[in-house]
């Protein structure tokens, strides 16, 4: 009976192809949207793992807290004091500044984030400025005055999609100084695989400071702290705040994981929206199965009557029609998955980011949905076929 049911699904090839393509288009959109949610979840989990033990320290008077580079500084000596706290693994003072440029367009009206790092301190392999992350050009050195390296994503975004060139120059506007600029030379392009870093520009700390004149020569506006383990993060954060409680300027701390958890909640809302859109699109595509199966049942009314007269039960008839619709649903899901995968890869190639991720979990979801759409789309036509009277069918012969 199974072979009979599957072969009958393609008795009218044109109509069967119509149903498969209708289902495939809905599931293709579903695949693209859900692969984006899978990709975002993957990147968020990787970022949370990477920043699990991180603490952000910034001036308490910063207008927008840690969310934006602060025009207010704090002594760089704070970093040396923080290093004395127990269970502190690393301390990285930085100068962060959004740099609008005259001849580069990074796709952000504010410019792109530039991080000035203290190259005198230890550079580890996981640091964006580490020599191992340089894919073109040279790394920064302690002699890198007015030199920068650019993350691969920021480099591609420059000049509207044309890669920034190693050896090229960038005219950076000095914030708050009218039209004054500083010419920076691009000495390298780096890639870490971390979207946050790869959309940034890095320089030595003095170069970044020169773009924000409100920060004194012995100050920074951000200090990154890493605890020796996630279980020490809260304690280290509290000790840092206690250490500088009565100091001027005062500081605030934010545990990176807590920040990312808040962001994850917002992403969850966005992902729910994508799920709803995906389901609506896939269900709309699945309507084609219902239409095709209903037409098939109407055309085969006499055949079903003869089958019942020859001994087929109502259950046999229902199972036969549902198997046909499931076959079409699964084929539509397979074609839609392939189209959606291609669409996701196209998006990744266009924006130069691994946004879409087709995981085994997503493949399972698509397969199950193909079966469900097949069952739901074929159930009413199957029941209608089972109600065919064999006597009336034989009279019509």
Image: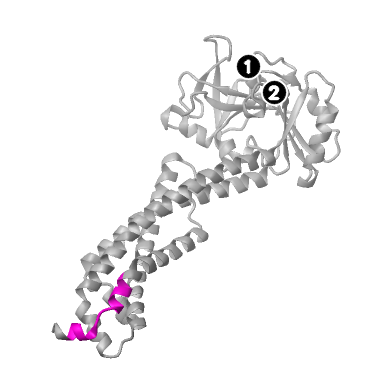
- Which residue lies under the disc numbered 2? 221
Q: Is residue 28 visible?
A: no
Q: At 28% from the left edge and 73% from the top edge, which residue is drawn?
A: 9
Where, by quadrant of the figure, is residue 253 drawn? Answer: top right
Q: Which residues are magenta?
A: 381-394
Relative to residue 24, is residue 73 depicted above or below? above
Magenta stretch containing residue 179, yes or no? no
Q: Please tell me whether mark 1 sits on a helix, a strand or a loop.
A: loop
Whole-angstrom CA distance, mark 1 to mark 2, is 10 Å
Dominant secondary structure (helix, strand or loop) of the stretch shown in magenta: helix
Question: Marks 1 and 2: CB-CB under 8 Å?
Answer: yes
Magenta stretch containing residue 384, yes or no? yes
Please indicate whether residue 365 sits to the left or right of residue 342 in the image.
Answer: right
Residue 297's x, y, as percent? 25, 73
Where, by quadrant of the figure, is residue 194 drawn? Answer: top right
Where, by quadrant of the figure, is residue 163 drawn? Answer: top left
- Which residue lies under the disc numbered 1? 212
Who is closer to the viewer here, 122 or 8?
8
Query: Badge 1, how many Cα within 10 Å: few under 14, some, many 20+?
Result: many
Q: At 30% from the left edge and 81% from the top edge, which residue is drawn?
A: 4
Count of numbered labels shown in the rendering: 2
Q: Please tell me whether mark 2 sits on a helix, a strand or a loop.
A: loop
Residue 310's x, y, as percent? 26, 90
Give the quadrant of the N terminus. bottom left
Which of the colour schemes (rainbow, by chain, secondary structure, one colour) is used? Answer: one colour
Please indicate whether residue 76 sits to the left or right of residue 388 in the image.
Answer: right
Ranked by sequence position, the earlier of labels 1 and 2 is: 1
Relative to residue 108, is residue 3 depicted above or below? below
Relative to residue 163, is residue 230 depicted above or below? below
The outermost residue toward the left is: 397
């Amino acid at each position: 009976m199974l072979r009979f049911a599957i072969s009958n699904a393609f008795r009218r090839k044109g109509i069967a192809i119509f149903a498969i393509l209708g289902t495939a288009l809905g599931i293709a959109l579903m695949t693209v949207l859900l692969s984006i949610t899978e990709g975002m979840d993957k990147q968020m989990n990787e970022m949370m793992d990477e920043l699990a033990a991180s603490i952000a320290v910034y001036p308490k008077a910063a207008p927008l807290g840690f969310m934006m580079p602060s025009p207010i500084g704090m002594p760089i000596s704070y970093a040396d004091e923080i290093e004395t706290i127990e269970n502190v693994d690393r301390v990285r003072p930085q100068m962060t500044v959004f740099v609008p440029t005259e001849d580069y367009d990074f796709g952000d009206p504010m410019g792109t984030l530039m991080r000035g790092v203290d190259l005198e301190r230890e550079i580890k392999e996981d640091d964006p400025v580490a020599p191992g992350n340089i894919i073109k050009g040279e790394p920064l050195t302690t002699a890198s005055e007015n030199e920068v390296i650019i993350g691969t994503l920021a480099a591609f975004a420059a000049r509207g999609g044309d890669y920034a060139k190693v050896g090229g120059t960038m005219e950076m506007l000095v914030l708050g100084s009218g039209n004054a600029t500083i010419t920076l030379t691009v000495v390298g392009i780096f890639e870490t695989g971390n979207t946050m870093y790869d959309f940034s520009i890095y320089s030595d700390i003095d170069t970044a400071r020169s773009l924000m004149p409100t920060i004194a020569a012995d100050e920074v506006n951000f200090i990154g702290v890493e605890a020796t383990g996630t279980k020490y993060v809260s304690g280290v954060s509290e000790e840092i705040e206690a250490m500088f409680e009565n100091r001027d300027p005062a500081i605030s701390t934010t545990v990176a994981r807590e920040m990312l958890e808040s962001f994850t909640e917002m992403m969850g809302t966005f992902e729910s929206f994508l799920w709803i859109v995906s389901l609506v699109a896939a269900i709309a595509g699945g309507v084609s199965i219902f239409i095709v199966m209903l037409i098939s049942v109407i055309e085969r009314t006499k055949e079903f009557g003869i089958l019942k007269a020859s001994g087929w039960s109502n259950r046999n008839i229902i199972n036969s029609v549902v198997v046909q619709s499931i076959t079409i649903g699964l084929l539509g899901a397979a074609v839609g998955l392939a189209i959606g995968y291609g669409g996701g890869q196209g998006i990744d190639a266009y924006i130069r980011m691994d946004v879409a991720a087709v995981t085994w979990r997503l493949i399972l979801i698509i397969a199950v949905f193909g079966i469900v759409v097949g069952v739901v789309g074929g159930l009413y036509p199957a029941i209608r076929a089972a109600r065919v009277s064999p006597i009336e069918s034989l009279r019509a012969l």
